[in-house]
Amino acid sequence: MTSPLLSVRNLVVDFHTGEGVTRAVNNISFDIPAGKTIGIVGESGSGKSVTSLAVMGLLQKPAARIPQGEILFNGQNLLNYNDAQMRAIRGNQISMIFQEPMTSLNPVFKVGDQIAETIRIHNSVSAKEAWDRAVDLMNQVGIPNPAASAHKYPHEMSGGQKQRVMIAMAIACEPKLLICDEPTTALDVTIQKQVLDLLHGLQQKYNMSMMFITHDLGVIGDIADDVVVMYRSNVVEKNNAKEVFYTAKHPYTKGLLACRPKLGANPRRLLTVSDFMDENGVEKHVSPERVVVFDKDSEAEKSSDILLEVKNLVTQFPIKGGIFGRTVDHFKAVNDVSFTLKKGKTLGLVGESGCGKTTLGRSILRLIEPSSGSIIYNGKDITNVYAEELRLLRRKMQIIFQDPYSSLNPRMTVSEILTEPLNIHNVGNGRKERLDMAKELFEKVGLNASQLNRYPHEFSGGQRQRICIARALMLRPEFVICDESVSALDVSVQAQVLNLLLDLQQEFGLTYVFISHDLSVVNFIADEVGVMNAGKIIEMDKATNIYKNPKEEYTRALLSAIPKGLVKSDLSALV
Amino acid sequence: MKENSLWKDAFKRLIKDKMALASLIVVIVYSLIAILASMGLIASDWAKEVGASNLPPSAEHWFGTDIFGRDVLAKVLHGTQIAMSVGLFTALIAIPIGVILGAVAGYFGGWVDDFITWLYTTFSSIPNIMLLISITMILGKGIFAVYIALGATSWVTLCRLIRGEVMKHKEREYVQAAGAIGGGHFRKLFLHILPNVTHIVIINTSLQFQFAIKSEVILSYLGLGVQGEPSWGTMIDDAKLELARGVWWQLAGATMAMFLVVLAFNLLGDALRDSLDPKLKGK
Amino acid sequence: MIKYIIRRLLYLIPVLLGVSFIIFVLFNLVSGDPTAVLLGKNATAKQMAELREQLGLNKPLLDQYFDVVKSAFTFDFGRSWATKQEISQMIIQGAYPSMALTVPAFIISTVLSLIISLVVAFYRGKGIDLFVRFMCIAGVSVSALAYILFFQYFFAYQLGWFEISGFEFGFPDFVPFIALPAIIFILLSLGPDVRFFRTVILDEIYQDYVRTARAKGLSEVIILLKHVLRNALIPIITYVVIQIPSLILGALLLENFFSIPGLGGITLNALNSSDFPVIKAMAILSSVLYIILSLVTDVLYTFADPRVKLK
Amino acid sequence: MKGSVLILGILLTLVFGCSKQNNFTEREINLVSPEKISGFDPINASDKYSGNEAGKVYEGLFEFHPLKRPYELMPNLAASMPEVSKDGLTYTFKIRKGVLFHDSPAFTGGIGREMKADDVLYSYKRLADPKLSAKGWWVLDDRIVGLNEWREKYSQAEATDYNEAIEGLKKVDDYTFQMKLKKPYPQFLYALAMPYTFIVAKEAVEHFGKEFLNYPVGTGPFVLPKFDQSSMIVYTRNTKFREKFYPSEGEEGDDKLGLLADAGKKIPLVDKINVYIIVESQPKWLSFMKAKNDMIEIKDVNIQQTLTPENELRPEHKEKGMRLFMLPMLDVAYFAFNHENPIFKNVKLRQAMNLAYDRDGANKLFHENTAFIAQGPVPPGLAGHRKEFKNPYSKLDIEQAKKLLAEAGYPEGKGLPEITIQTRNETVARQQIEFFAKCMDKIGIKISVGMNTWPELVNKVTKKQHQMYTMAWGADYPDAENFLGLLYCPNQSPGSNGANYCNPEFDALYSQATILQDSPERTSMYEKLNEMVALDVPWIFGFNRTDIYLTQAWLKNYKVMEFNHNQFQYLNVDLEVKKQLSKKF
C-alpha cells in the first residue's frame, strides 16, 4: 500500500481565549489515501471543521495553536510550512468548499473573475486564458450557459449555482485534495443531491482525494470510501464506510445512524444518541420496544373535529415601480391554498425554499395579513378579526420559528422570555406563580430549572429550540405552527426535538402544522402531508401514502433526492 | 458557565482592555470633578484673585494665573463641570429625540418613516453652524442655549442610525415571536427592539459627548458659548489673544484637560463598540 | 435608474420647502429687525422704516415666506442686504478659495486615512495598530483652535515654512497659503476617518468570502487591497460623500485665521449682520448639494456594489 | 504610518520655501485692513475701514491737512474754501478745474472725463436717493433746502429723477455751485470731507448699475479697476492724477521727523498699494513681524508685545527700525445705562457704580495704560473738553461707592437685581465686562455678561431691551457735538442716544450750542454741557483710547491721524532701507 496523500497524526488544536484554553481537537489521527473520499462526521463543535481548517492552514492565529501533531501532505509536514509555502499549496493542491455558498463568494466580483483569479494565482496564464478556463470549469460543474453566467455576480445566481461556482473554483487547479465542509447543508434537498452527485463525479474524473465533513451520516453514504466519526474533539470511530454503516461499533455512531428519520417505517419516537450511550459515553442497551415500527394509520381516525380550515387563501406582496414608487403589480407568495386540519393531528407542509410555505404559516396566524380567502379556526372566521380578538387568538395559536439563534431576544433572560406571554395575557397570579408555570414547562421541555436566569446565548442550539417550544406552549395553545423548527439543528439534536414535539402533542393534545423542506422529517412527524410549489399545494395525502405513491413529478423528485446512503431500514440490527 | 447578561459580558470585556479601562477611569474622574464642582466643593473660588495677573505656573499655582490673577487650575476644574454638563445635557436632549424618532420611523415605516426621514434630511442639509447660531440667538446666550443648540443638531445622526438598526431588527424572528405571543407594537418596539439597539446609543453617546465638548470651544470662539463663568472654550478663546504675549499656560491647561477627556471618550467609544457590537463579538 | 434619479431630485421639493421654512422662521421671525444694523450707527427711525419697506419686511409673513420659497426654487437670491453684492457672485468668488483649501485637504485626508486604516487593519490587534489608532485619536482630541494658534505661530512664523495668512487666486499660487490650514484640516479628520474606515474594513475581514480568498491561496495583502477594500467601499462612500456639504462651511475657523476669503467667512459675516438673503442662499445651496450628493452616493453604490439596483 | 510620513513629506517639500519673498524693487506699500471690505460705494462707507479704502480711489471737496494739528480742513476737489452768506445758510463752492475721472468703460471711448459741478450735485443727490438708503444720509438729512422733500417725493416712485431742480443744490456754472442750508450747520464742511460725500461720476453709476460698488471710478490718486472680495486689494497709481503736491508746511517739529522731506513733490509717491485683509489678531501681528506689512494698528493684547511698561517701543522692535506712533483717539468707551429702566433713574446708584469701577486696573489689563480715563462724553482734543475738569466719579473710591449705594437704597447691593450688560461677542469685550463685574462685586452688585452678535446688540439697543450695554463711539468729525449728541433726548433709540438719557436742561443748551459756528462762546457752552452731564453720570465713563500704530522703518511720511482716509497718497517707501533691514527679519 502506498503512503496516503494526507496523513493527520496525533493532531491537537487548542483555542486560547480570554477565559482560558479550550481543546478543539484532541490527539486525532487519520489518513486520506490518494483518490479516496473520507467522510468526517460529527455534530457541531465536535472539532471536524477545525481539523479541516488546520489542514488548510487557515486557523485564526494567535487564538488557535497546535501544540502537537503532524499534518503530512505528500509526506511533507504542512505545519512546518511558512505563509508563502502554504499559499502555494492552498487552492492549488488542497482546496476547500464551504458550507455557506451565499456568503462565501465575494459579492462584488463576477463569478468568472473569481474562478479565474484562482487559476491566475497558481498558474502563469493570461487573463483571457484564465477566463476561458473558468468558463470551461463552469461548464463542467453544470452551470447552464457558462459563457454568459461567468459574467454574473453571485447575487444573480441561486444557492445551488453558487455552490457549483465554489466547486469550480476549488477544482480550478485540479487539486490533489478537496475539502468539503458541509457543502450541502444550506441547500434544498433536490439541490443537495445534485451537488453530491457532481462532487462525486468530479472526484472520480480528476482522481482527487476528498475530505467530506458533515453532521449527517446519511449524506455521505453514497460517496465516502472511509468514515471518521468525531465526538467531542476525539475520533471515536474510523473505518471503511460499509463497516461503519452496517456494523457501527461506537454507540455514538449507532446513535447517529438511528436518529435520522427514515422515509418508510419509523419507531413511535426516534432513537437518539442518548439511547445508545449515557452522558459519560458509556454504551447503553436500547430497549427493544423503542425500535418497534409505529403504524400511524392505526390511530388516524380517532379524532374527527376540524380545528382549522383554510379556504382559497392568497397572500400577495406588492411590487413597487415608477417614479413615485407606486404598486405596479403583486407577487403571490401564497396562491389559492385550501386545506383542513383535524384536532390533535399534524399537517406537514413540504417544499423548497421560496415555495411560500413560511408565508402560508404566518398568514394563518395573521402575522402577515392575507390578501383574500378565509381562515376558519374552531368554526370561527378569523380572517378579519382585529385587536383584542386577535390578541386573544394568539393564546390559542402559536408558532415556533426556524432559527433558534435569532428567535430569542438576546437581552432577556429565559425566565423573562417565558413569563412574557403570561404577562401579556395576564395569565397566572403575580410573578411568583408565573415563574412557577415557566419552571414547570421549562423542565417539561427537558431543561434544568436552575438555568432559568440565564440568557439565550448561554444555551446550545438544541436547547434554545426547546426554549422556543416552551415559550410557544406557555399559553397552553391548541394549535402550533412549527416553521422549519428543526432544520437548523444537527441530525442528532433534530431527533430529540422531534421526539419532544411528539411528546408534547400527546400530553397537551396539540394540533401542528409542521413546515419543512425535509420530506423525511415531515413524513415522520405528520399525519398528512402537503407538497408546496410556487405558492400552491400541489399534492396532499396521508403521510404513509405520499412516499409510497407520489402522484406529482415534483413530489417524486423530492423523494428521490433524499439521501438513502447505505442505511438499512431495519433498526433492530442496532439493538 | 456563570449567569451572565450580555451587558455584564460586555463590561467584563471592556475592563479587560487596559486602554478602555484607563479611559473609563478618566471619564469617571472627570465626572467626579464635575459633580464636586457643581456642588461647590471644589473650584468654587475660581473667581477669586489669588495673585498677580498672568503668573506663569509655579508650585503655588500649578497652571499659573490668568489675566485677572485667577487660578487657572481652578478655572480648568470649573470648566470641567461646564464641559461635562454640555456633553451630558446635549446627550439628554439628543438621545430621546433621536431614539424615539428613529425607532418610530424604522418600526412603522410608511408615511411616518417618510415624514421623519424628511425631517432629518432637512435638518442635516442645513449647515450645522447656522442652526447653532440661530438657536443661540433665539434662546439668548448662555449654557442653556448651548445645550439646546447642540442637542438639536446632534439627534440627526443617532436618529438615522437607530432607524436603520430598528428596520433590521423588526424583521428578526424574536420580534415576530413577540408578535405571535400577542405583544403589541409598543411591546415589540420598546421592550424587544430598543434594548437590542442600545449599544448604538451608548457608542454614539460616547462620541457625541466629546463632540459636544469640542463644539463648545468653537461656539465660544464665535462668542456663543457659556457666559459669565470659565469654560475650556472661553479659556482657549482667551488664549488666542494671550499666546502672542507668551501666556501659554491657560491654553495649555484647557487644552490638556480637554485633550484627556476627549481622548478618553474617543477610546471608550471604540472600546464600547468592540465590546457591545454583536457583529464584532469574539473578534 | 433614471426613474430613481428623477424621484430623488423631486425629493428636493419637500426638502427645500422644509429648509426654507426653518431658515425663514429662525432668521426672519426671530432675529428681529435687521435695518438698524444695515444702516449703521447714525441711522434714524424714519430711515429704518423706509428700508424696512424696501426690503419687503412690511409684507405679510406669508408673502415673505413665499418669496423665500420662490428664491429657493429659482436660485435667484438677489443681493446681500449688508454688502449689497450680488449673492451669486459672492458665492462664486468665495467658493474658489474654500474649495482650494478643503478639496485637496479632504482628498488627501481621505486617501491617507484609507491607507492608514488598511495598514492598521493588516496589523490588527498588534502594537502598531494600537499605536497608530491612538495617535489618530489623540490628534483629533486637540481643539482646532489650539492647533491653529500654535501651528501658525510655530510653522508659519518661527520656521517660516508657510505663508502666515492670505490667499492668492490661481494654482499653484495658493499652495503656500492653503498648505498649513490644509495640514490642520487633515490632522483633524484623520482620527474619525481612520476609526471609521478601520471598523468597516475589519467588518469585512471576518466575512466568509475572505476565508474563501485565503483558501484560494491569495496573499493577505491582495485580499485586503482587492477583496476587502472593494466591499468596504460602500460604507466608505456614504461616509465620505455625506461630508462634502460640510466642506463648504467646515473650514470656517481655518478661513478666519488664515484670512482665506471663502464661504465660511461669508456665512459668518452674514450671520453676524442679519444678512438674511445670504443666509438663505447658503442654506438652500447646501441642502441642494446635500440632496444631490446623496444621490451621487446612491449612484456610486451601483458601481461599487453590483447588488445595488436603483429603482 | 509609513504612508502618512511619506505624504506629509511630499506635502512639506511642495510648500517648503514657497513662502513668498518680500519685494525690494517696486515702489509699493503694504497695509492691513482688519475688517472685510464689502464694496466701494462711498455713500455706504460708514466705517473707518471702508472709508480708508474708498479714500484711495475717490475724493471729496475737502480734506484734512495730513500734517497740521489740530485738524484743519483744506480744499481738495474744491478750488478754495467756500463763500458763506451772512446768515450762514448759503454756501458757494468753486471746484478745481482739470480734475479727471479714472478711465473706465463707462465713459465714451473709455477715457475719464473732467469732473464738473454737475457731478458734485449728482453725488450729493445720490446720497439722498431714497432707493439707495445710504448709510451716510444722516450727514445731509434735514440740512439742505428742498433735499428732504425731493427724497420724500421719490420714496414711493419707480425711479428717482436726478434732473429735478432742488432749491438747496444749485449749479451756477460748470465749476461753481451753491448749497442752501435750512438752518445753521456748523459741521457742514466736515460733512463734505467725509467719504459719504466723495464725488462719483453719473456715467459710471448708470453703466455699472448695481455692480457700481465693485467698479470704483473716482478722481483719486489710485486706481482699482475692479474690486473682488478677496484677501487682498491692489491699487495702482493713477497716472492721470492731477497736479497735487506734498504739503510744504506742517505741525511744528514735522521737518525734524522727516515728514517734510518730500515737500512739493507730486503725489502719489508710490506706484502701488496692497491692502491685506486680516481679521484675526495673531496672523496680523505675525505678518507684520515678518515684514509682510508696512504698518499695523496695535490693539488689545498686541500692545504688550509692542510697548515696554513705560509705554515705549520695545528694544527688539526698535532694533528693526520700527517706529511707534501713539495718538489719543477722538473716542469714548462707556457702559451705558438704560435710563428707561427705573433702577437707573437713581443717580446715586449710577454714581456708586462709577466710583466702584477700577479704571486704572482696566487700563492696565486691557490697554496697557495707554488709554486715558474719560471724564465726560467729550474726549480730549476737542473744544468742549477742559483739561482741568476732573470728574469726581471717574475714580476708584469703594468706601464712597458703598456709601452712595446704601443711600441709593441698596445697602451692600441688597435689593438690587442682577444686572446684565450686553456686549458684542468678542473675547476682549467679554473680559472687560468680567473685570467690571469683579469691581461691582466688591460693593455687592451682581453683574452678568450678555454676548450678542452685532445685529442682536443693535436690536436690543434700538428696541430698548437692555439694562446696560457697552459702546465705544468714534468721532465722525472733530466736533464735540458728535459726542454730546449721544445724550441728546431726541436722539434716543433708535437714534444714537442708546442710553435713552433725557435731561431737559442739557437738551435746551445743546440745541442752542449746536447751531453756532466754532467760537469761544460755543466752546464754553460745550464745556458746560460736558461737565453738566459728566456729574449726572448717565454712563459709566470708561476710556478715551489711544491709537497705536507701528510702522516699518521704510514707510515714510506717516503721521498718525484720526480721519485718515486721504492719508495714503502722501505715504512713501524707502526701498534701500527696506532691503538693508530685511536681513533682520
Image (tube, coloured by chain):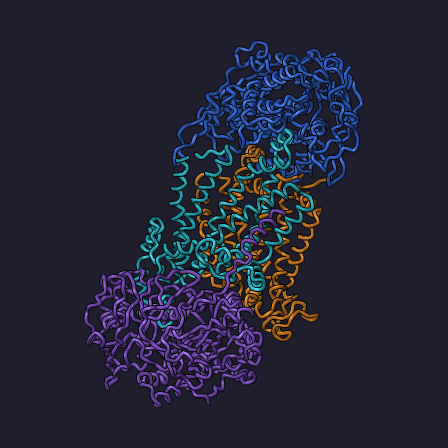
Q: Chain A hue? A: blue
- The answer to whether residue C167 is above or below residue A198 is below
Q: Residue furthest top?
A: A549
Residue at coordinates 64% horizontally, 57% vertically from top-left? Answer: B260
- Residue D14 in percent (x, y) is at 54, 53
Q: Which chain is purple?
A: D
- Residue D521 in percent (x, y) is at 34, 90
For residue A124, what is the image quadrant? top right
- Residue D432 in percent (x, y) is at 52, 73
For residue C86, what is the image quadrant? bottom left
- The answer to whether residue C245 is above or below residue D244 is above
Q: Is residue D354 visible from the viewing direction of this image?
A: yes
Query: Along the line of sight, which residue is nearer the eye, C307 or C24?
Result: C307
Q: How many marks?
A: 0
Q: Is residue A171 left or right of residue D448?
A: right
For residue D219, what is the image quadrant? bottom left
- Residue C178 in percent (x, y) is at 50, 56
Q: Which part of the image, by quadrant, shows the N terminus of chain A?
A: top right
Q: Which chain is orange?
A: B
Query: Along the line of sight, which residue is nearer the eye, A539 or A415?
Result: A539
Q: Is residue B219 left or right of residue C141?
A: left
Q: Chain C hue? A: cyan
Q: Is residue D542 visible from the viewing direction of this image?
A: no
Q: Which part of the image, by quadrant, shows the C terminus of chain A?
A: top right
